Image (tube, helix red, strand yellow):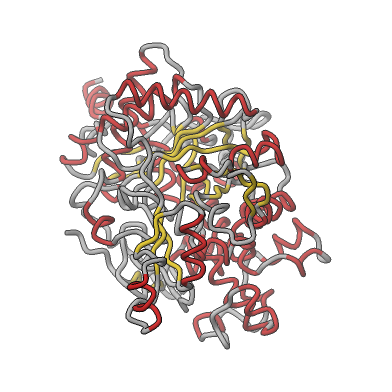
Amino acid sequence: MIQWPKSNDALGTVNRGNPCESGLCTLCMSDCKGRCETWMSSLRGRKMLYPRKFGKITAGSGNVTSLGLGYHSIRIQGYAYGSTGLNEGMTKDADDCVFTNVNTETTFGNEIKAKCRLPIMTGALGSTMIASKYWNSFATGAALYGFPIVVGENVVGVDQESKLGGGKITSAPELDRRIEVYRRYSDGHGAFFVQLNVEDTRNGVAEYVIDKYGDDVIIELKWGQGAKVIGGEIQVKSIDYAIFLKKRGYIIDPDPTDPIVQSAFERHAITSFARHSRLGATDLDTVGEVRESFMRSIDYLRSLGFKRISLKTGAYGMEALAMAIRYSADAKLDLLTIDGAGGGTGMSPWNMMENWGVPSLALHAKAHDYCKILDDQGIKVPDISFAGGFAREDHIFKALAIGAPYTKMVCMGRAPMIPAYLGSNIEGTFYPERRNKVNGNWDELPQTVKSFGKSPEEIFSAWEDVKKKVGADEMKNIPFGAVAMAGYIDKISCGLQQLMAGVRKFNLSEITRNEIFSANRETEKETGIPFMTEAQKDTAEAILKG
């Protein structure tokens, strides 16, 4: 098993807990006082692209070998000449071919194209309480910086203020709140997704969304995710709330209506209840039945009025991957998100996370191969989003390259949540009267934050950029978590521009699989990406023999 280092002396970053390939701790705490790379980027922005203490140091890479199969075993190519993808009006002159002129905008969609300023989107932020607590920061940051956000499954069903009439949702205050926060700051870039599972479908969430919001919302069907192979889960500590959820049609474990369980709860032997969603497609036995059922679901959603529909699938094996890609193509879906094992979670069985499913790189490499099989037959391939343990700009670049030309987006789950935690904690110390409202966890600023300044304007490198976007008067309404999000976005967007400039690609649409190579033979075999000394071998030998 590969052990990732807990600290990076060059950047001055340290993980509180055990780090994983993404650079995040395996357990990311909302009250964390720093200093992983994503945490630091939320405050310092693009400064975190470089080693610390400039002028007093030199720095050398510690990553000289890449063992095993994973995104870490893919390396990025570089070119010594040329440039492609420059914006209109620019020339191939060196004054135009600078990284700040790299265009990171992208689009996705079948007939209706969603425009995004960055090729990223959030993972599904669903019914886990942490998603609800920090939603204002997530949504405001995503809207201001023009990338899509996804409301995950069960948000309506678990809302105690929502109302049912005739077995269908008639009022959904929490969903309405989430949509309105994003809409307030959106300028037309990005997109808003609402995800459906079995219970959402039974409760009429799709009908509610289309009736109230029309086709502004992209509706997303969910087959699974990379973190687990069962339905969505949350934990609740109130027995009354657990009973409410059982009446809503969820599976509650243990059963809060069982007298024995109630007695154990009163005596504190049981202190919480797990709410589970159901597995989909349990009544289907063949691939053909799955296709028919899926196409009926799509036809029904289109009959309601949805013009944009997406699918999220998990780290299943090759059969399910092929079904997801082919059926999405046949249904002319707007986006297919493929989430590899290693994906994040708000609540999943831990050993299930550690042991189930196909890891991200292997799954994504095969997804590319399957997309090409369709493409070679003249079948239009759906736009693809890859997910499963991404946090940095190099992850984004590699994911886009491994799936090129089909991959338009990279879905990031836990990483963009960190700025929201951090900003909320800081806001709660400067404004104690807001602490509960913003779910701040700190009573005072830790030294890790104080070292950057004494005021929000000093602490957040992106403060002035956000103020420029919204105006000085509106800054009082912007959550500090959204300002921290701006710092994180500044770092990964600038880093992506630099990587693209290094491969001489000034537009995302120009990225190909030629921009990466494998760092070991196992990765070459499994991905089809040439080993580092095999890439460009033919042209190299032609030069020598010319």
- 66 w.r.t. 320: above or below: below
The location of residue 380, given as percent across then percent down, is 46, 18
| Whether residue 374 is situated above or below residue 94 in the rendered picture | above
Q: Residue at x 30, y 32 (%)?
A: 320
Q: Quadrant of the C terminus?
A: top left
> On the rendered structure, is 349 left or right of 457?
left
In x, y percent, where is residue 506? Answer: 53, 36
Residue at image location 66% in from the left, 29% down from the top: 88
- Foreground: 104 or 429? 429
**Figure check: 207 above or below 270:** above
Residue 460: image quadrant is bottom right
* Image coordinates for residue 473, horizontal then vertical, percent: 83, 66
- Determine whether, in the image, residue 246 is placed left or right of residue 19: right
Residue that appears at 64% across and 60% down: 161
Identified at 58% across, 32% down, the residue is 86
Image x and y of residue 304, in percent: 63, 29
Residue at the limit of the structure toward the right, as seen here: 473
